[in-house]
Amino acid sequence: MIKFVKSVLSVALAASLVVGCESQDGPGASDQVSPQVLKAFAERFPDAQNVSWSVKGAYAVASFYWSGTRAAAANCSAWFDNAGGSWSMSKTEIPYSALPQAVKSAFEASEYVAWQRDNDVDVLTRSGEVEPEIYVIEVEQSGREMDLYYSPDGVLVKTLADAGPNYDYGEFIPSTPAVGIDEYLAAHFPGARVVDVDVEYGGTEVEIIDGGVARELYFDGTGAWMYTKTEVRRSALPAVVTTAWAASEYAEMQGYQLDDVDYFETASDGNYYRLELESRNGDVKLKITPDGVLSLYEPSVDTGSGLPADEEAFIRESYPGATIVEREFDDGYLEVEIRHEGREKTVYFNGAGAWVKTTWEVRYGEVPASVKSVLTASYASWQFDGADFVQTSDGEWYEIELEQERPEREMKLRVAADGTVLG
């Protein structure tokens, strides 16, 4: 473990420079690629064809076709430290049929097996004693696209919203951790395999595979351990936890459905299970200790700790004066809860760190008259059941939740502020 962390230092000192730096692409970019990189590339990828270069921060990135992979002529990319010429990461493609059997078996037993699967699988190979290969399977269902990251032995280590066809996995180059993190990992998770090290705003996030279990650890800016988070299946919940939930006002009998469970081990707040519940009355998060003490989960307000630099900058610029409350990954998105202008808002980013949308709850009295007119004229038999205001790069709208009792039905309606029905 200690050897891994030290091994990434030579390739990761400039990793943080990639984020937020302008990249230069095209024919002119090759003039800025160092001779050391060109030499290292020729040695590592002989007979590469259709090579083009881009410079991204401290890295020179080659895009090319190469027959030295398990696909006939795969679309590949490779990252090199432009100053020293050392290789950092490569992306190649293989057909799904060429995946290790452990990965195929894990995917085919997962909840995503019914989704439409891309036949081409991206293979990420990185320098240092990190996982030797990571396999990225792309799936799609009902307009949602997800990237599933698997280790060679079939552990699903990451699930992210698809970042688009031009995503180059630059964020997956391990960053430099703070001093002391390697010692903590060696002492508390001996034999664990590190998947990713990401130096973020005010701290470091480390993803590991510990005995076949994926865990996420967070350390503050000094390298002090703050928490370990492990996703838990419902079937693995202790009886004392499920009993406490069933006896609460948020039980399934009261209309609350379990969406996600994580187990937190923390430095300052003890250990607990966090249950994320969905219902027609709104979403709720419960905190249940291992001995069954239940309370509503209330995140502690921080100052952005744990956010990647670009996402932090976006929020500060787009929502001036906002207080960052919490960040977490859910359904493939990085969700950041903020308090801005007296409201609780949720800001969503995809797997590449690009802003997707921002939403916040609005009361019926805040809905514009033009939108209410649409509801009165065309949906008079439906009852108003809540609304969110949604901001995206494509526009803004109100997402109205409607319901009927007989027959029992629910629907969501998107309406622009001027009353235009968007779907």
Image: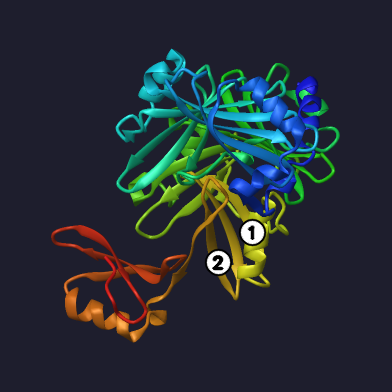
Residue 380 picture quarter? bottom left
Q: Residue furthest left?
A: 407
Q: Which of these two is toward me, 183 or 158?
A: 158
- Quickly name the residue at label 1: 325
- Neighbourhood count class around disc 1 (C-alpha, 10 Å): few under 14, some 14–19, many 20 upward: many
Q: Which residue is mark 2?
A: 344
Establish if 304 lies above or below 199: below
Residue 116's x, y, as percent?
Answer: 31, 35
Q: Secondary structure at mark 2?
A: strand
Disc 2 + disc 1, Cβ < 8 Å: yes
Q: Residues within 10 Å of mark 2 (few under 14, many from 20)?
A: some
| Mark 1: secondary structure | strand
Identity of the amino acid at label 1? Val
385 vs 65, left or right, is: left
Image quadrant in which the N terminus is located: top right
Q: Quadrant of the C terminus?
A: bottom left
Relative to 294, say whether 148 is above or below.
Answer: above
> What residue is at 68 percent from the left and 72 percent from the top?
321
Identify the mark nearer the N-term, 2 or 1. Answer: 1
The CA distance from mark 2 to mark 1 is 9 Å
The spot of residue 255 in percent (x, y) is 34, 51
